[in-house]
């Protein structure tokens, strides 16, 4: 199974609704600056910077400095621990639903 620390970091980073909204903005842009992210949200530039720091630590975004600006882009590989975790439990639930379907057919043919 995937390392628990990486799953925890990704889940913790995406658990905050504002941070998730920032991440979605980054995903929908090729690259985006803090200023652009701040304009599109209802939080301060300092708060955006803190959210970006958490997303970066979780491996969900990468930054590219250019002069005085820093551009952020999504890192799809950062979601891998979450995808693996979900697919592991997806198999679990698919098996359970298949068993339930069989049981219901036996009860009410």
Image (cartoon, rainbow, N blue to C red):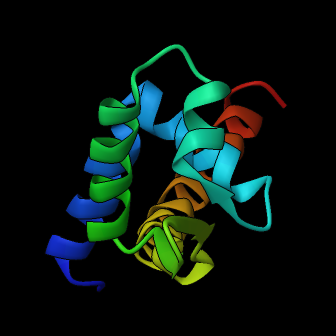
Q: Most extreme residue toward the front, as rendered?
A: 67
Locate residue 94, reporting x and y percent: 62, 58
Q: Residue at x 48, y 75 (%)?
A: 63
Locate residue 14, reporting x and y percent: 41, 45
Q: Residue at x 31, y 31 (%)?
A: 47
Q: In the rendered image, is residue 98 in sight?
A: no
Q: Is residue 23 shown left or right of residue 49?
A: right
Residues 88 and 102: in front is: 88
Q: In the rendered image, is residue 29 in sight?
A: yes
Q: Is residue 69 shown left or right of residue 15?
A: right
Residues 55 and 85: in front is: 55
Can you say whether 16 is above or below 41 in the image?
Answer: below
Q: Most extreme residue toward the top, as rendered?
A: 42
Which quarter of the rendered picture does the C terminus lie within? top right
Q: Most extreme residue toward the left, as rendered?
A: 5
Q: Residue at x 43, y 37 (%)?
A: 19
Q: Residue at x 60, y 54 (%)?
A: 33
Locate residue 93, reporting x and y percent: 53, 53
Which quarter of the rendered picture does the N terminus lie within? bottom left
Can you say whether 22 is above or below 84 in the image?
Answer: above
Can you say whether 96 is above or below 61 in the image?
Answer: above
Locate residue 103, reporting x and y percent: 62, 41
Residues 73 and 17: in front is: 73
Q: Is residue 60 shown left or right of residue 32?
A: left
């Amino acid at each position: 199974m995937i390392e628990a620390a990486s799953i925890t970091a990704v889940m913790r980073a995406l658990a905050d609704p504002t941070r998730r909204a920032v991440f979605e903005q980054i995903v929908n842009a090729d690259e985006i600056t803090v200023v652009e992210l701040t304009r599109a949200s209802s939080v301060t530039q300092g708060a955006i910077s803190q959210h970006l720091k958490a997303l970066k630590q979780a491996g969900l975004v990468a930054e590219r400095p250019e002069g005085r600006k820093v551009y952020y882009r999504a890192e799809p590989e950062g979601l891998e621990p979450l995808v693996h975790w979900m697919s592991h439990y997806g198999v679990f639930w698919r098996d359970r639903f298949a068993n339930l379907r069989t049981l219901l057919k036996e009860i009410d043919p």
